[in-house]
């Protein structure tokens, strides 16, 4: 039986970090359920992406996860399957697809590790930062797969960064909290992935595993420390 794109990416993320213990594909919900959950989420949630969403709900000691992908998004990925190559026609769709899966996976892993404050802003920012970092790394793997040398060029990286970071428009959010969340996490992820690009495969894997284990405040402090360490001093890079 052929694996779906969803199951392949879940398996990749689980090999990188830890196994969730469930098939997250079973958490995919339809549009009617997504509309209902969006209404329950409050006014600010209406500004979030309508083509894909991840919903989390804590009831007792159980975490309920719902992942929504619009029919339009699925049609785009089926018409331009990223497993046959990445291009301007499917890069945005793949980014959205990976990020929502990533939100669900890391929420489940954090819940297994004892995290219960899933409604907090720090938790939301942590998931968003982690998703942008992981999505960049997943995109690198897709690009490398279709290169004869299995190497990703500077041009490839600039292209990925443009679509993942530069094209984001946090200022478009009317809600001040959402605007701040996406502005901050985008800047942090862009800086951190630049550092990751300087590491070889083994060191990068060790680094991102340690990074995932940190809470959001510690992640920010870690990135700021890296930025300070690599900033030019008297015209010399450390």
Image: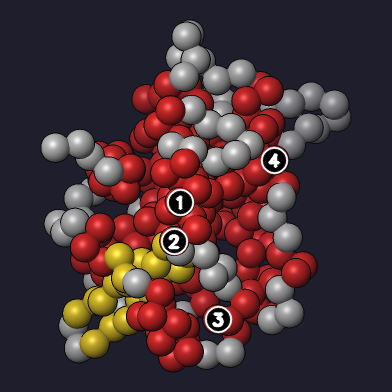
Tell me the quadrant of the picture where the C terminus can be found.
top right
Q: Residues within 10 Å of mark 1 (few under 14, many from 20)?
A: few
On the image, numbered disc 3 is attached to which residue?
45
86 shown above or below 220: above
Q: Which residue is mark 4?
A: 162
> Disc 4 or disc 2, which is closer to the eye?
2
Quick one: label 1 or label 3, which is nearer the N terminus? 3
Residue 114 in the image: x percent, y percent?
A: 24, 71
> Of the numbered discs in the image, which one, if any, rests on residue 71?
2
Spatial distance from mark 1 to mark 4, Cα to Cα?
24 Å
- Expressed as whole percent of the image width and height from the top left, the position of residue 125 reads 53, 67
Is 180 drawn above or below residue 218 in the view shown? below
Splitting the image into 4 quarters, where does residue 26 fall?
bottom left
Kindly identify which residue carries mark 1.
75
Per the model, the C-alpha gap separating discs 4 and 2 is 26 Å
C-alpha separation, residue under disc 3 versus residue under disc 2: 20 Å
Along the polypeptide, which appears first: circle 3 or circle 2? 3
The nearer-to-camera label among 1 and 4 is 1
Instruction: Tell me the CA gap for discs 1 and 2.
Output: 6 Å
Residue at image coords 63%, 37%:
88
| Total numbered labels placed on residues in the image | 4
**Residue 220: x percent and y percent?**
57, 57
- Residue 146, image x, y percentages: 47, 19
Camera-side mark, 3 or 2:
2
Judge by depth and name the residue closer to the eye, 176 or 188.
Answer: 176
Question: Crowdedness of circle 3 by 10 Å Cα count: few (<14), some, many (20+)?
Answer: some
């Amino acid at each position: 039986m052929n694996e779906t794109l969803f199951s392949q990416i879940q398996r990749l993320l689980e090999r990188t970090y830890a196994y969730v213990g469930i098939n997250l594909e079973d958490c995919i919900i339809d549009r009617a359920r997504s509309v209902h959950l969006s209404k329950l989420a409050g006014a600010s949630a209406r500004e979030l992406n309508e083509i894909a969403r991840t919903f989390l709900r804590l009831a007792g000691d159980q975490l309920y996860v719902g992942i929504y992908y619009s029919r339009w998004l699925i049609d785009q990925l089926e018409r331009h399957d990223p497993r046959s190559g990445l291009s301007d026609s499917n890069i945005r769709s793949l980014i959205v697809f990976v990020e929502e899966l990533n939100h669900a996976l890391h929420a489940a892993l954090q819940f297994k590790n004892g995290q219960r404050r899933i409604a907090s802003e720090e938790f939301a920012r942590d998931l968003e930062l982690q998703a942008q970092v992981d999505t960049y790394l997943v995109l690198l793997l897709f690009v490398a797969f279709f290169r004869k040398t299995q190497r990703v060029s500077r041009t490839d990286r600039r292209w990925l960064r443009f679509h993942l970071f530069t094209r984001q428009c946090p200022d478009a959010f009317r809600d001040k909290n959402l605007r701040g969340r996406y502005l901050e996490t985008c800047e942090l992820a862009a800086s951190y992935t630049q550092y990751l690009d300087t590491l070889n495969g083994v060191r990068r894997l060790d680094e991102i595993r340690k990074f995932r284990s940190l809470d959001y405040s510690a992640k920010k402090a870690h990135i700021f420390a890296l930025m300070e360490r690599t900033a030019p001093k008297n015209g010399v890079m450390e």
